[in-house]
Amino acid sequence: MSGGPLAGIRVVDLTTVVVGPTATLFLADYGAEVIKVEAPGGDLLRTLGGRSKSGQLSGKFTHFNRNKRSIVLDLKQDQALEVLHKLLATADVFIANIRPAALERLGLGAQALRDKHKKLVVCNLMGFGQRGRYRDRPAYDSIIQGMSGVAACNARVFGEPKFVPMVMMDHAVGLIATQCILAALFHRERTGEAQAIEVPMFENAATFVMVEHLGDLSFVPPLGDWGDRRVLDPLAQPIATKDGWIAVSANTDGQAFALFDAIGRPELKTDPKFNSVKARYANVKEYFSIRREGLKAKTTAEWLELFEQSDVPAGQVHTMESLIEDEHLAEVGMLRRIDHPSEGTKIELNNPNTFSAGLRGEQTAAPFLGGQSIEILSELGYGQAEIDGMIAAKATLDGRR
Amino acid sequence: MSGGPLAGIRVVDLTTVVVGPTATLFLADYGAEVIKVEAPGGDLLRTLGGRSKSGQLSGKFTHFNRNKRSIVLDLKQDQALEVLHKLLATADVFIANIRPAALERLGLGAQALRDKHKKLVVCNLMGFGQRGRYRDRPAYDSIIQGMSGVAACNARVFGEPKFVPMVMMDHAVGLIATQCILAALFHRERTGEAQAIEVPMFENAATFVMVEHLGDLSFVPPLGDWGDRRVLDPLAQPIATKDGWIAVSANTDGQAFALFDAIGRPELKTDPKFNSVKARYANVKEYFSIRREGLKAKTTAEWLELFEQSDVPAGQVHTMESLIEDEHLAEVGMLRRIDHPSEGTKIELNNPNTFSAGLRGEQTAAPFLGGQSIEILSELGYGQAEIDGMIAAKATLDGRR
């Protein structure tokens, strides 16, 4: 057993790229056994996610797929579909991010699965909810960012709509899918009842933006413009220091006054334009430009030391190179360097949260494509001859190395 | 009972602003009874989050705090602290986003709480993990964005570090905290053991960025630069149409060729610079600029209709005004218009996910400050005289309206 709150829970994972693999990444961290079912071509992220010595383990793929096993099944073949059902008969959770119509064609619609596997929690990730007109549209993170208002928030800052250069909504919706599965497992544990869950990306993304930025537009008639002005202000940005960039957030009087002292402008503490939260908010452009001018004088390290002493909230603006060398991250044990059998020395990431009763114990690196096909087929009771037949028919693939 | 997988679970919520309220928002959606414990001044977001008729129910506050009850307790007073412990004796979960040292001073450290309340799951949200050097630093979303590499991702697009104009890491870490609590409740249900959880913002945010963008830098020595180039490309942006903006993501050959046909450039389908995924990736700047030129010719609605027919993934770039009028969102029932007792007509948001066994049934609007103080104190067995005494001492506040 893996340890962790989900020890003994088996997840059959028919997802690729980011939204689904995020959901099962966390389930694995919590101790679930995740079996990644891949088409013969494998998860696109294996190659699209960047370079790798083996040509199938891009950094991005490995981080989203640690602690999982991989079996290749060509679900267009009946034999492979039968294996999937045998697997589901042993599983607690099934998760897929295939369009609903395609799942139905494979006989893997939620109702069919629940009829066949009474104890199975079924989670379907989809672009758009099935009761609305966009139900058949394909979805990608950037399209969802455009539709959900992320790009509109950026338009306030940059003058025209821009995407956030992260697949942030794939990622966020994956986190929500993990929640949904955990809630359903809790329900099943208490009541014995398994259930089906639908998690639509667009609706979740729109909610993510609206809870934060619908603001004054939440009222009819509106009380003002939408958006939290403090967050959307184009001037609320990292600030250049003598040698780099710093993030500073001096909000209370105590913090702002300490900042004024630090930049050698103590007179501003009694200036009616800056001597209260309300005053600074009313004169925010001037306040921010004073901050920006003042912070040019010293290096980031010098400012951080000063601000630490005076309790002004601040942090270095890391690049990815400096982030992986961050001493705090080392002290809390966030990164591990491992000797990977095919990739050489490699950085692995740990789950950052602490559970007093423990998380998953043993950590395994992301699987080769079909790396555990044979192992899993054997566990399901398939004999060598049957397995060889499936390999020959390309219903599966032996990816051991 | 509320219905939903967490029906009957009681959460005592000592959090404010976004990260904690996000976590408990989802717990409430799943059916938990969330009791928001507020200091006499109330959650800052009540006023900082925008305008409201009552002066205490900003749109932003209401969206993060629907389905919660509010009790005011001035925890600096022993009497109020005693009420909190009585409440905790009836609760399943305690969550706080107060700095650990301050919680210890109140006698509300995780160990003290667990000694006193054996069945209580304790979740502490904090800026930084307690084993690292930043343990005592204050954290705000923008500082975390700077430190975790979000601003560095934007630097690739905009030339210098910029924040994402959403408190995206508060939000994402809140989603993770919900997971942690659900996993711990599942563990308690199976084993009888309650546990304490620590959820540090910086480490979770750094992970959020690194799993996606560490990329080739995951290997030692690095195989190349960090970052997923397709996401970080400055040209991968919404595109202007005749009357607005559109998001288009034509990735496969089929999608790209349909796009070439739609913009009247069918010859590009056989052009060696654009006739395969690999070719388009190698000539991405030219590909994107052709796309940009071609899409000027029609309106967004015209393109969407064309692209729907030819299965090119695309979506409108909504503003917040157009988003709340989106017909798909209306069809799936995402927004409700309610008659609020103090605020007039108001838009409420629903949880977007479907559970076949049901989510929370009854929906209640976000509470007035201390709106349920009296109700909750009565439930705990306090008599009228005691309650009046606490009100007089300002240990609580009667916020009924």
Image (cartoon, coloured by chain):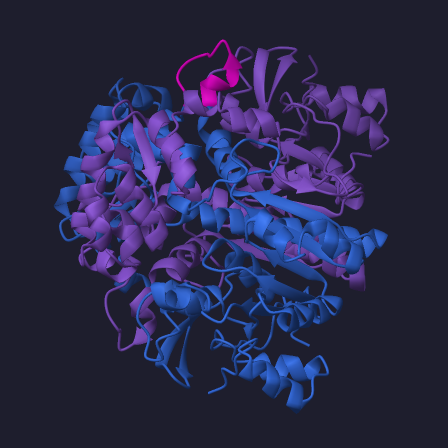
Chain colours: A blue, B purple
Can see residue A356? no
Which stretch appears magenta?
Answer: A215-226
Q: Is residue B235 above or below residue B372?
A: below
Q: Residue at x 33, y 22 (%)?
A: A281
Q: Is residue A275 above or below residue B156?
A: above
Query: Which residue is farthest bottom?
Result: A384
| Quadrant location, the C terminus of chain B | top right
A303 or A17: nearer the viewer: A17
Q: Position of residue B220 (x, y in %)?
A: 30, 77
| Quadrant location, the N terminus of chain B | top right
Q: Position of residue B243 (x, y in %)?
A: 28, 22
Judge from the rendering whether residue B203 lies leftward or rightward of residue A266; answer left or right.
Answer: right
Q: Position of residue A63 (x, y in %)?
A: 44, 66
Judge from the rendering whether residue B8 lies leftward or rightward of residue B40; answer left or right.
Answer: right
Q: Residue at x 69, y 82 (%)?
A: A379
A150 or B368: nearer the viewer: A150
Can see residue B168? yes
- Is residue A52 covered in magenta? no
Judge from the rendering whether residue B289 lies leftward or rightward of residue A350; answer left or right.
Answer: left
Q: Number of marks in the image?
A: 0
- Is residue A225 covered in magenta? yes
Q: Is residue B222 above or below residue B264?
A: below
The quadrant in which residue B282 appears is bottom left
The quadrant in which residue A119 appears is bottom right
Q: Is residue B324 above or below residue B96?
A: above
Q: Residue at x 47, y 64 (%)?
A: A64
Q: Position of residue A125 (x, y in %)?
A: 57, 49
B236 or A110: nearer the viewer: A110
B209 or A302: nearer the viewer: B209
